[in-house]
Amino acid sequence: MSTRGHAGRQRRRLTATEVDLERPRQRALLVGTGIGTRSAEEAEASLAELALLADTAGAEVVDAVLQRRDTPDPATYIGRGKAEELQQLATALDVDLVIFDDELTPAQQRNLEKVFAVDVVDRAALILDIFAQHARSQEGMVQVELAQLRYLLPRLRGRGAQLSQQAGGIGARRGPGETQLEIDRRRLVRRIQKLERDLRELAANRQTQRKARRRRNLPTVALVGYTNAGKSTLLNRLTHAGVLVEDRLFSTLDPTTRRLHLPGGETVLCSDTVGFVQRLPHQLVEAFRSTLEEVVDADLLVHVVDAAAGDADSRLAAVDTVLREIGAGDVPRLLVWNKADLADAEALARLTDAHPGSVVVSAATGAGLTDLLAAIGDRLRSLGRVVEYLVPYERGDVLAAMHRAGEVLVEVHDDVGTRVRARLPEAAAGRFAEFAAPA
Ligand SMILES: Nc1nc2c(ncn2[C@@H]2O[C@H](COP(=O)(O)OP(=O)(O)OP(=O)(O)O)[C@@H](O)[C@H]2O)c(=O)[nH]1
Ligand SMILES: [Mg+2]
């Protein structure tokens, strides 16, 4: 995050292509400890993923070191002796940047920068940096900047002088179109408050759009999953949506919604969403809450998994965790194994055996898509629909009938009556049509 020792580095924020042209890629040393992982393989996989993240962010990974520890050292995370040893390696390799796979406290980060005498960032900062590079929509940019500033705020102390310069490089890159970052803490807080206000306004807009979609009364399906699982490829395949597809992490930040026609004749709305990853920074999850409401609000989540990835199970668990964090833990899910063309048949069979009801597809070749569409239709029909109602206070009988007919998800009492969100079978939903809430 600092620019210390990098006098020649660009001070102006560069676009991704400019960075490639004008500045050699930052040379990065990766350090993992496996703290919090259950096995050596998991620790290795996490470090391998960190390398992918670093590459996506534009750094050149020159080495990755796994230094197993059970608990972090409070001052230097890996312990002073180990840090000094790694510093020699860093010097020998001429690195510009050391990236830790775990979240560092502000003090650990400062201490490590003293030892290494180059920039030290953690996984969270790296992910924030990638998001900053990929944000395109106004809402996306506000969300990313907010997450970055919230990450930065506790790390300000004692770094003001360095941060006052417009820095380039991982951990210091800003969201596109951002105004000059003010390092004075009070101004930073004011900036955060302004972004929070902006975001509330943008979120209100999004809410209006969502309400309008609900009014059209179409069931909604959201594609969720690990980053690079093939969600956008699948949406494009199914709907010709024209969403950007890349073999990079976090290509999609903004949700795209398209109509999707099911073989049973129904039309549903299908949204593509931001991908997840192990230990997604909580600042990002917080900031992206309004975008992620697409997921919370969906009738059905289609969880897309890269079946060719070796650690499909831990990715599955990571997605589960984020879904629970954003309050979508209870939304019905259909599990889809993608990239069947790459996965080996035995592994695929194991996965489908372990997860009954899951579907195998290849978004690339189109294999399995007819089955997928049929499965989506079947699941939606069996689930019923989530509808919002406004029930006058004198109609307690209707409320009671709704509770009997299906699942009442939310019940709020306001001055006109009881506002209800309920998941009801198609027939029952029709019976209560006269109480549908005005949008
Ligand atoms: N071989 C093969 N490659 C696929 C398949 N589906 C997607 N891909 C590739 O996987 C990479 C990621 O695809 P995306 O659709 O961008 O993945 P995503 O889940 O939207 O990723 P993010 O938006 O970054 O979270 C691209 O290079 C795709 O071409 C598939 O079924 N088979
Ligand atoms: Mg995508």
Image (cartoon, rainbow, N blue to C red):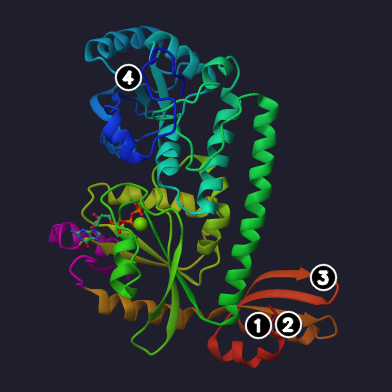
Label 2 crowd bin: few (<14), some (14–19), many (20+), radius 10 Å: few
Q: Distance between the residues labelled 2 and 3?
A: 18 Å
- Helix, strand or loop at mark 1: helix
Q: Residue 414 carries which label?
A: 3
Query: Label 4: which residue?
Result: 96
Comparing labels 4 and 2, the label whose residue is closer to the camera? 4
Query: Label 1: which residue?
Result: 404
Q: Earlier in the sequence, mark 4 or mark 2?
A: 4
Indicate whether residue 350 is drawn in magenta: yes
Q: What stretch is highlighted in magenta?
A: 340-367
Q: Distance between the residues labelled 4 and 2?
A: 65 Å
Note whether 112 is above or below 433 in the view shown: above
Q: Distance between the residues labelled 4 and 1?
A: 64 Å
- Helix, strand or loop at mark 2: helix
Q: How far apart are marks 3 and 4 (CA)?
A: 58 Å
Where residue 281 sits in the image (x, y, percent)?
Answer: 48, 39
- The answer to whether residue 54 is seen in the rendering is no
Q: In the figure, is residue 435 to the left or right of 111?
A: right
Q: Earlier in the sequence, mark 3 or mark 4?
A: 4
Q: In the figure, is residue 3 to the left or right of 19?
A: right
On the image, which quarter does residue 152 sit in?
top right
- Helix, strand or loop at mark 4: loop
Q: Which mark is residue 400?
A: 2
- The answer to whether residue 351 is seen in the rendering is yes
The residue under label 2 is which amino acid type?
Ala
Note whether 374 is above or below 124 in the view shown: below
Query: Is there a contact, CB below 8 Å, between mark 1 and mark 2?
Result: yes
* Residue appearing at x 41%, y 52% in the figure: 319
Where residue 181 sits in the image (x, y, percent)?
Answer: 57, 31
Comparing labels 2 and 3, the label whose residue is closer to the camera? 3
Q: Which of marks 1 and 3 is nearer the N terminus?
A: 1
